[in-house]
Image (cartoon, rainbow, N blue to C red):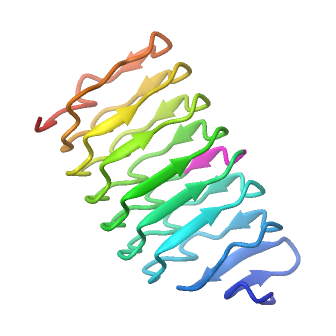
């Protein structure tokens, strides 16, 4: 294990970031982030570099002070509960590469207002943005194929255009949208 001045603990043999803290900057050479690596951390902003292919389950769970998230090009997947309960998350920048947002990935991110999804996104799983009470705008591009049940339930989405590429929308995908 080592720390390279990035305020994190990294497993040397496979370049996995296993623990991060408030001042962590994920180094460009990191290939993976461990589950729960930032769980409950006081971090305000994080950039997921393009060498990381997947954001694992619970990686940033309950980071209640996280306000801004940037996911660089080539990250493929945002896993279950990755950013769940990040109640102050206001800004998400998702670059090309992300093809799947898994179950409850952004569940209870109540400060989130707008999301612009990349063309590469193909699937939004169940409860992905559940209870994001201030979510008003989403931009879905051609390429999205599936939106699962309760993906956007308990939000305030007021305008939505579904591209022709969408093959399946579960009938409860947008239940309890308040606006």
The answer to whether residue 114 is left or right of residue 76 is left
* Residue that extends furthest to the top in the rendered view of this protein: 164
| Image quarter of the C terminus | top left
Residue at 11% of width from left, 38% of height from top? 178
Towards the viewer: 96 or 41: 96
- Asked where in the image residue 16 lies, by quadrant, the reply is bottom right
The answer to whether residue 52 is left or right of residue 88 is right
x, y percent for residue 173: 28, 30
What main secondary structure does the magenta stretch of the protein show?
loop
Which region shows up in magenta?
Answer: 74-78
Tell me if residue 59 comes above or below residue 95 in the rendering.
below
x, y percent for residue 13: 88, 76
x, y percent for residue 159: 25, 27
Towards the viewer: 48 or 59: 48
x, y percent for residue 45: 51, 71
The answer to whether residue 117 is left or right of residue 136 is right
**Magenta span has 77?**
yes
Tell me if residue 137 comes above or below residue 79 in the rendering.
above
Towards the viewer: 41 or 65: 65
Residue at 23% of width from left, 31% of height from top? 174
- Asked where in the image residue 1 lies, by quadrant, the reply is bottom right
Q: Total marks drawn?
A: 0
Residue at 25% of width from left, 22% of height from top? 171
Residue at 25% of width from left, 58% of height from top? 110
**Magenta span has 171?**
no
């Amino acid at each position: 294990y080592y720390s390279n001045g990035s305020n994190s603990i990294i497993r040397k043999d496979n370049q996995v970031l296993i623990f991060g803290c408030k001042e962590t900057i994920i180094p460009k050479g990191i290939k993976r982030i461990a589950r729960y690596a930032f769980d409950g951390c006081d971090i305000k902003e994080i950039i997921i570099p393009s060498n990381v292919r997947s954001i694992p389950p619970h990686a940033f769970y309950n980071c209640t002070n996280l306000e801004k998230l940037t996911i660089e090009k080539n990250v493929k997947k945002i896993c279950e509960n990755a950013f769940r309960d990040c109640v102050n998350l206001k800004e998400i920048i998702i670059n090309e590469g992300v093809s799947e947002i898994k179950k409850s990935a952004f569940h209870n991110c109540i400060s989130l207002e707008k999301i612009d999804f990349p063309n590469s996104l193909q699937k939004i799983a169940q409860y992905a943005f559940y209870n994001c009470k201030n979510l008003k705008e989403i931009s879905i591009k051609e390429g999205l194929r599936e939106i699962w049940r309760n993906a956007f339930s308990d939000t305030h989405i007021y305008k939505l255009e579904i591209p022709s590429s969408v093959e399946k929308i579960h009938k409860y995908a947008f239940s309890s949208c308040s606006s």
